[in-house]
Amino acid sequence: MFLNTAYAQESAAAGAPNQTAVMIANVIPLVFVFGVFYFLIIRPQQKTRKTHEAMLKALDKNDEIITTGGIYGTIVGIKDDTVLLRIAENVKIEIQKSAIASKKGS
């Protein structure tokens, strides 16, 4: 805010505005805001997604899991993108791997 005023006063005194300095002064805040967004929002979200994908790849039979809907169960079978889950005695459901929130105890 004050930089533009300072450059405006300087250019009026010099006669011709320095366009490069004005452009740099306008771009620096945008770069700063992008950097803040990257380190506070984008990077942690990517890290969380990678750890979740690694957990899904490491699933095995008899692992106890929690689904995104809050259902606790034990893995009975694993297919490409689905999991057969035992939630009670003689009760099995098939869910997508992406619906698994975490392993129980993790």
Image (cartoon, grey):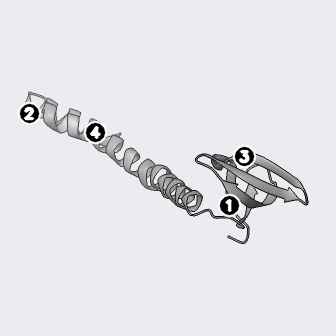
Q: Residues within 10 Å of mark 3 (few under 14, many from 20)?
A: some
What amino acid is labelled 3 in the image?
Ile
What amino acid is labelled 4 in the image?
Val
* CB contact under 8 Å: marks 4 and 1: no
Tag 3 or tag 2, which sits nearer the N-term? 2
Tag 1 or tag 4, which sits nearer the N-term? 4
Rounded to the nearest angstrom, the CA distance separating label 3 from label 4 is: 48 Å
| Side of 65 where 97 appears, left or right | left
Q: Residues within 10 Å of mark 4 (few under 14, many from 20)?
A: few
Tag 1 or tag 2, which sits nearer the N-term? 2
Closest to the camera, between mark 2 and mark 1, is 1
What amino acid is labelled 1 in the image?
Ser
Q: Give the residue at x 58% y 62%.
A: 55
Tell me the residue that label 2 is attached to: 14
Rounded to the nearest angstrom, the CA distance separating label 2 from label 1 is: 64 Å
Tell me the residue that label 3 is attached to: 95
Residue 97 percent across, percent down from the top left: 64, 49
Tell me the residue that label 4 is attached to: 27
Tag 4 or tag 3, which sits nearer the N-term? 4
Closest to the camera, between mark 1 and mark 3, is 3
Q: Is residue 53 above or below residue 29?
A: below
Q: Is residue 1 above or below residue 40?
A: above
Seen from the viewer's position, the closer of residues 35 and 27 is 35
Residue 9 percent across, percent down from the top left: 21, 35
Closest to the camera, between mark 2 and mark 3, is 3
| Side of 101 where 22 appears, left or right | left
| Side of 28 where 55 appears, left or right | right
